Image (tube, coloured by chain):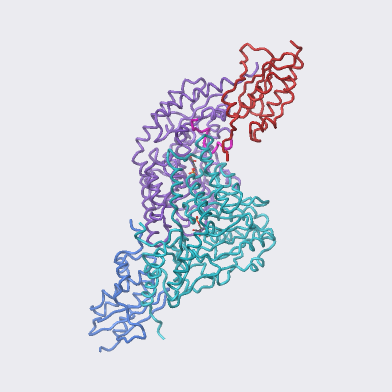
Chain colours: A blue, B cyan, C purple, D red
């Protein structure tokens, strides 16, 4: 029986987010998307070389599950092909982090942001 | 277990005072006063005496006739019995009722249910500090108004209403006046005989008594005969049947005696804690105090920081046990209706944290709370995105 | 205190088992699990875990899904919620209801209130032994029947109804079936999954748990959505709001575990006591046993002597703590409606005494009870006038 | 605070009634009245000499308050003038024994029985 609404992994990712993006004012390389929907404000930023993500970072105002999901996505995709951004599986994230279904909408925002970022990176001429 | 957390949620519920727990213990076992107080036999009469003595203790605390106290399962039931009971019993005389959106859900949800049943409810807004201007009550009273419910101390902000003036207005207009005093009893002086209040809801677990027992005071007055919610026997004048829980009532009585004795000390104590916590966090950029300091009970300190998300803030505050709005709101995850009604914008209401203090809170706990709060806010602010220009 | 009396009123209420009292104690104080289980914080979650574990213990006792148990303040409230809730929520489909005059007042009074509200109630009479013939239930069911309430064990006589057959009939006719099992849970096997029951009322204080807490099982089934009686927040799916009394629920859970473990021993024990008491008094001239020995739970022994007055008998029985009819009747002083409905004439019902036994009753107490009963009857008989020829 | 429905005096009179009348079958002197009303069966019996009550006894089926009241009346009037039987004061009895008002009806039965007995004794030619 577990009445903790957060899984151990969610707690760990929430308490030590290592992929905080630089603020808009701070010097930053790469591209970035911003979304403000479903009560969530989210910015995803990335740099890529030869179709591979060098950095993937986020800033977010949202619930612990969303913060953990952002951190998890960044950890998963860094060093992987840019194409991964267009292939985010909300169901898989929710299962891995034990995110309640009521929060699906917020995870879909993350999926959308990642896809938009992937599209931008693909449209950007190689450095 | 208290090694695992720092409990600052006394407005949600208090621990039972050890002296009260001991009294309860004496009313449980085979060698104690456990019998059914409705029974005519010796053991039953001993239980009945214990109940009578508890009624006297509670009556002393609020200065009322002990014979006018009904035992219930808590303030939720007391509120329902008062509001549904009086509204329905007087429906033939009129169906207009008055309350505020800043009341506890155990009041607002009852009025909403009555609205669906064909009653008309006027919802009075408070000032930004949370207090009701008596003039707006006066303006709302009509010839068909039957009942007004205004709480004494607000459970989210500590805002204190001017029950004396509001009661006077109701009395002038011949309207029944119900006060949810769950957060006030044993903390602020409340004199039922001096005030013009007709129905008063109380709960033991807000004053170091047990959960699962409350009381409703009903003034003896023409036209004040609430319909019962429960049927099932002759107990409590048929207004609230069921076997009386002797240990809970004895515990409530003892908690009331202690509260009477300790009220001033308790008040001084929580006031000092509140001031100290406020000093420890007031420099947090963008911090806002919800509720007027001057008109709030200091056992509660409610603060917001613009733009932070409440659930994340609550988690970042662990191991502090505090509340976003009232505990009852915690399951619904939407910004507090109380703060909204006070005009607090959603972006601020979202991050509202209620600290509440009690008899067993220490200064050290409050100091630690300030440190943790500052760190949590700064951590989450650091994660916030800026909207692109 | 038990030196002052001999308690033989376990059907009215039981003492709390010392192991249960210890569990309760752990959920009271500042170092215990006292927090509001609705709160999201650590302390709240620890309380929620305690509640969940209590639900599992109770669910194991009655073999049901713990998620379908609602916590209430006792069987009186459970009965009201079941009956008022289902009758009102289904009123648009039909307003015919069925119950028996031998039910507890917490059932009959609810049905009477519904009669005043325009519902039609069929009152089924039992056999002289107190048991309902399933054929009379079948004859009473109509196309507009919405709800049937039949208790499992009668609180005055111990008469046991054939819930399996009665439930089957209700299911066949698509009628909701409510069982007041307050006197049965933990004493007789009761398997909710196997039986065709839709709503089951339970109370902790009849099985060595605390007073002030009960439960209502509501089967997950189309059309079974009782209207709430109380409004006030999101707790318990909005069906029963209010701060959950953690110590009471934890105590109920522990009492349920113990009952599951001790049910057979408890039964053997009370059966032996009942037989012994009966042997000790059966030679009293004019003595009548109310309720069929073969179909009664032996924790209760109900006897009458023609022509004696009940209140005087009760006083002459001191220091025995026994009941005239049910404890709830004690305040009304009229012959028990249960015995009347069984066809017992008033002159006999008048003198009915209910002895009830439990886990802590000793053989010596029962022996003493027999001696005192014989002496009291003989003393009062000696005072009786004879009508002139 | 006293939740005992019986006063100490009521308890004492109830537990030691010394004025039980002989049964109808038993040999008895004097006169007697029988009443069956208000759920109460009551027989009062008396013997008198020269207008003075020698014995006053009762038999009753009733509540403890009524039993105590009967015993109290017998103790009070024995050895006193017969006329006392016609001058029973229910209010005084109820106050002395602390009998609840709900039971007034039963005490009035006792008053009536006493009065009837007094009338019979006065009508009886002196022995
Ligand atoms: C103002 C107010 N009213 C009513 C209640 C409900 O009280 P209870 O939990 O006793 O039902 C509470 C607390 O939960 C409260 O703070
Ligand atoms: C059969 C039955 N139903 C209901 C009740 C009422 O239970 P509670 O006292 O828990 O409200 C009782 C006992 O009083 C009972 O015996």
Q: Does the rendering let one see residue C69?
A: yes
Q: Within the image, what quadrant is residue B121 found in? A: bottom right
Q: Position of residue B45 (x, y in %)?
A: 53, 37
Name the residue nearer the viewer: C143 or A126: A126
Q: Position of residue C163 (x, y in %)?
A: 43, 39
Q: Relative to C356, say whether B256 is above or below.
A: below
Quadrant position of the N terminus of chain B in the picture: bottom left
Residue B195, image x and y in percent?
Answer: 63, 58
Q: Residue at x 25, y 89 (%)?
A: A127
Q: Classify residue D25 as left or right of residue B207.
A: right
The residue stretch that appears in magenta: C319-333
Where, quadrant-wise, is the C terminus of chain B in this rendering?
bottom left
Q: Is residue C270 above or below residue B109?
A: above
Q: Quadrant of residue D33?
A: top right
Q: Is residue D73 above or below residue C234?
A: above
* Relative image position of residue C161 (x, y in whole percent): 45, 36
Q: With A31 as the anchor, is C5 left or right in this view? A: right
In the displayed structure image, the side of residue C351 where residue D118 appears, left or right? right
Does residue A111 appear left or right of residue B173 in this picture?
Answer: left
* Residue C344 visible from this viewpoint: no
Q: Is residue B278 magenta?
A: no
Count of residue discs: 0
Q: Nearer the viewer, residue C196 or C172?
A: C196
């Amino acid at each position: 029986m577990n009445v903790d609404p957060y899984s151990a992994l969610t707690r760990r990712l929430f308490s030590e987010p290592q992929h905080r993006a630089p603020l808009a004012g701070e010097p930053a390389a790469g591209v970035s998307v911003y979304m403000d929907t479903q009560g969530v404000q989210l910015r995803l930023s990335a740099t890529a070389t030869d179709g591979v993500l060098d950095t993937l970072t986020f800033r977010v105002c949202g619930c612990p599950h969303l913060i953990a999901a952002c951190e998890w996505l960044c950890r998963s995709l860094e060093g992987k092909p840019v194409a991964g951004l267009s292939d985010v599986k909300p169901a898989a994230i929710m299962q891995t982090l034990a995110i309640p279904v009521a929060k699906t909408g917020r995870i879909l925002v993350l999926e959308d942001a990642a896809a938009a970022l992937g599209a931008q990176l693909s449209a950007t001429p190689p450095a | 277990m208290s090694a695992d957390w720092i409990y600052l949620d006394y407005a949600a519920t208090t621990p039972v005072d050890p002296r009260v727990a001991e009294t309860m213990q004496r009313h449980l076992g085979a060698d104690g006063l456990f019998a059914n107080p409705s029974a005519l036999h010796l053991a039953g009469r001993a239980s009945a005496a214990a109940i009578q003595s508890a009624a006297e203790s509670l009556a002393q605390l609020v200065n009322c006739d002990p014979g006018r106290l009904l035992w219930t399962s808590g303030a939720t039931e007391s509120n329902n019995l008062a509001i549904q009971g009086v509204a329905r019993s007087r429906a033939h005389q009129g169906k207009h009722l008055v309350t505020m959106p800043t009341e506890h859900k155990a009041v607002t949800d009852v009025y909403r249910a009555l609205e669906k049943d064909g009653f008309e409810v006027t919802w009075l807004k408070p000032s930004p500090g949370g207090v009701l201007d008596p003039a707006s009550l006066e303006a709302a009273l009509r010839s068909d108004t039957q009942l007004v419910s205004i709480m004494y101390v607000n459970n989210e902000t500590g805002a204190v209403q001017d029950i004396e003036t509001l009661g006077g207005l109701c009395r002038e207009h011949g309207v029944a006046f119900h006060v949810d005093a769950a957060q006030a009893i044993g903390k602020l002086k409340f004199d039922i005989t001096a005030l013009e209040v007709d129905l008063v809801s109380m709960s033991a677990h807000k004053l170091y008594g047990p959960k699962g027992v409350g009381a409703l005071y009903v003034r003896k007055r023409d036209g004040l005969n609430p319909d019962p919610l429960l049927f099932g026997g002759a107990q409590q004048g048929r207004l609230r049947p069921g076997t009386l829980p002797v240990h809970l009532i004895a515990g409530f009585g003892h908690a009331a005696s202690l509260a009477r004795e300790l009220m001033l000390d308790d008040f001084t104590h929580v006031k000092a804690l509140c001031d100290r916590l406020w000093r420890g966090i007031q420099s947090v950029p963008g911090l806002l105090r919800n509720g007027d300091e001057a008109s709030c009970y200091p056992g509660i300190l409610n603060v917001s920081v613009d733009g932070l998300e409440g659930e994340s803030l609550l988690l970042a505050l662990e191991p502090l046990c505090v509340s976003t709005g009232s505990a009852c709101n915690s399951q619904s995850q939407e910004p507090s209706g109380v703060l909204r009604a006070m005009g607090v914008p959603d972006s601020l209401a979202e991050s509202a944290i209620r600290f509440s203090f009690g008899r067993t809170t220490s200064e050290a706990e409050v100091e630690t709370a300030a440190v943790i709060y500052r760190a949590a806010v700064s951590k989450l602010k650091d994660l916030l995105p800026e909207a692109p220009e």
